[in-house]
Amino acid sequence: MADRYVLAVDQGTTSTRSLVFDRGGRMVAVRQREHHQYFPRPGWVEHDPMEIWANTQRTAAQVLGDMPDAGDVVALGIANQRETTVVWDRVTGRPVTRALVWQDTRTADLVTELAARPDAGLVAERSGMAIAGYFSGPRLRWILDHVPRARERAERGELLFGTMETWLIWNLTGGPDGGVHVTDVTNASRTLLMDVRSCRWDPDLLAFFDIPAEMLPEIRPSVGVLGTATALNRALPIAGALGDQQAALFGQACFAPGEAKCTYGTGSFLLQNTGTELVRTRSGSISTVAYQLAGEPVRYALEGSVAVAGALVQWLRDGLGLISSAAEVETLARTVGDNGGCYVVPAFSGLLAPHWRGEARGLVAGLTSYVTKGHLARAVLEATGWQTRDVVQAMAADSGLSLPALRVDGGMTTNNLLMQFVADALDTPVVRPMVGETVSLGAAYAAGLAVGVWSDVEALRRNWHRSAQWTPTPERARALTAEYPRWERAVELSIAWGAP
């Protein structure tokens, strides 16, 4: 029997990629295209949904054309930047404004206003997450309040809302001509509008945020046929959809409670599987949906979202000019044996998990004349490790689950100094898989599982193979535990600095 392949569309913050995977979980073809980043005001970040849709069509057609026999590609899975928000006209298919990206901070005043309401506790109780501008519900409310006639048109049923997977699925399945308006449960869980237990849109949450139900997509499982993509050069069942970080959890085969992964990219995102139990957070992590297979119970996760990780290295390169490429940060950091007492808190636009302090601002603490650019480079890398420790400690307090190892992926995992620091800071082994494209692989796994390319999640687990491991050094782990309070004080300073 001819081998069967799965197409994955990975719609990310900076680019859209289309990739083909075989049954062994190996990538056999890839095409990528970047899209423009719009910054119309300080703190505002926007994308053009039409450009992203065009890039999806183009890369998918190209990668299918790269296959010797495209007929062997049997399903399509989608992973997406999660909280980025799109509103469009159901008749014309045109967005009413650019997409508001998950990094966008324009809803800060709205969030403050909503959080001060006496019934604000309803949001955390029903959605599992506190009110924050990070999620897509406040962005949708902002569009309804600020785009002319958007609210009245939405209430008449003329406008549709979705995150990026909803926008792409609608267009792939026909757009104005019968496009399917759906979202998967992981992306719906990031809106603050879904009851995290029933996995349905919650009428009380819709009333709290003043969102018309008419514009919301139908919530579906992550693994299961959502529709047929007819807009490509061949029809394919769209059989899986996951938010990017949940897709990485799926691609890392973290299917058992306690298993966790951390993706180190622009930011860092650590998810720990908690099984069918919804763990209520008390320590600053997020209670969220991990994934759902059609016909099976929802699996939940705790998540720690860190806004700035790799972006801090980019700042060292582009903002300060201390390195000419991201890879040089490790070389520079290795010119010294420690951070020289220097700590960098990268709260460029506030702190996310586990602090959730939007007023925090970035700072460099502990500067003396002894500190060199090597120490600063080391402090930049260590900031990512310290933030990981913050998140892991919060999750442990919430779940009580042990962390036998941390599976990692993303561009920063090629930095051996950083990965060893993370292992020592956590006193836990850090493991990188053979296939680094875990977000895309997770989308492929979801789609292939739905159509029988893989029989069950155990088949996916057998595909996982280790490429590298960093084992903690006991002496170094003890030293970092003693040093950790200095990092905590630096974080407190960053919060105090931004306070009114």
Image (cartoon, grey):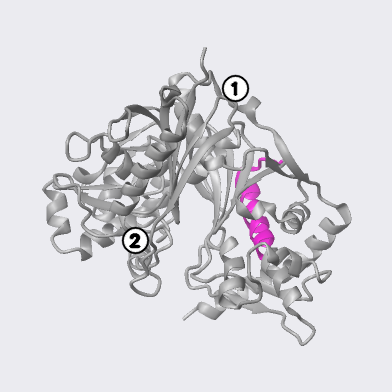
Residue 377 quadrant: bottom right
232 to the left or right of 492? left
- Position of residue 414 in the picture relative to residue 472 (left or right): left
- In the picture of the structure, the residue carrying the numbered disc 1 is 459
Q: Residue at x 40, y 71 (%)?
A: 43
Q: Is residue 395 magenta?
A: yes
Place of residue 483 in the rendered image (x, y in percent of width and height, measured from the top left): 78, 67
Question: In the rendering, at what x and y percent does residue 436 appear?
Answer: 61, 43
Instruction: Please tell me how many numbered marks the rendered image carries.
Output: 2
Of the residues shown, which amino acid type is indicated by label 1?
A: Ala
In-front residue for pair 253/332: 332
Work out whether residue 89 or residue 129 is closer to the camera in this orientation and state it.
89
Disc 2 marks a residue whose amino acid type is Pro
Span highlighted in magenta in the image = 383-403
User: Counting other residues with Cα less than 10 Å from the Cα at mark 2, is it few (<14), some (14-19), or many (20 or more)?
Assistant: few
What SS does tag 2 mark?
loop
Residue wearing tag 2: 118
Residue at the far bottom: name it: 369
Q: Is 189 placed left or right of 334 in the picture?
A: left
Q: Is residue 391 above or below residue 500?
A: above
Real-space CA distance between mark 1 and mark 2, rounded to the nearest whole angstrom? 49 Å
Q: Can residue 297 be spotted in the picture?
A: no
| Residue found 65% across the figure and 51% down from its top | 392
* Foreground: disc 1 or disc 2: 1
x and y percentages locating residue 487 in the rendered image: 70, 69
Question: Quadrant location of residue 74?
Answer: top left
Q: Is residue 228 above or below residue 242?
A: above
- The answer to which quarter of the image holds residue 451 is top left
Comparing 286 with 306, the one in front is 306
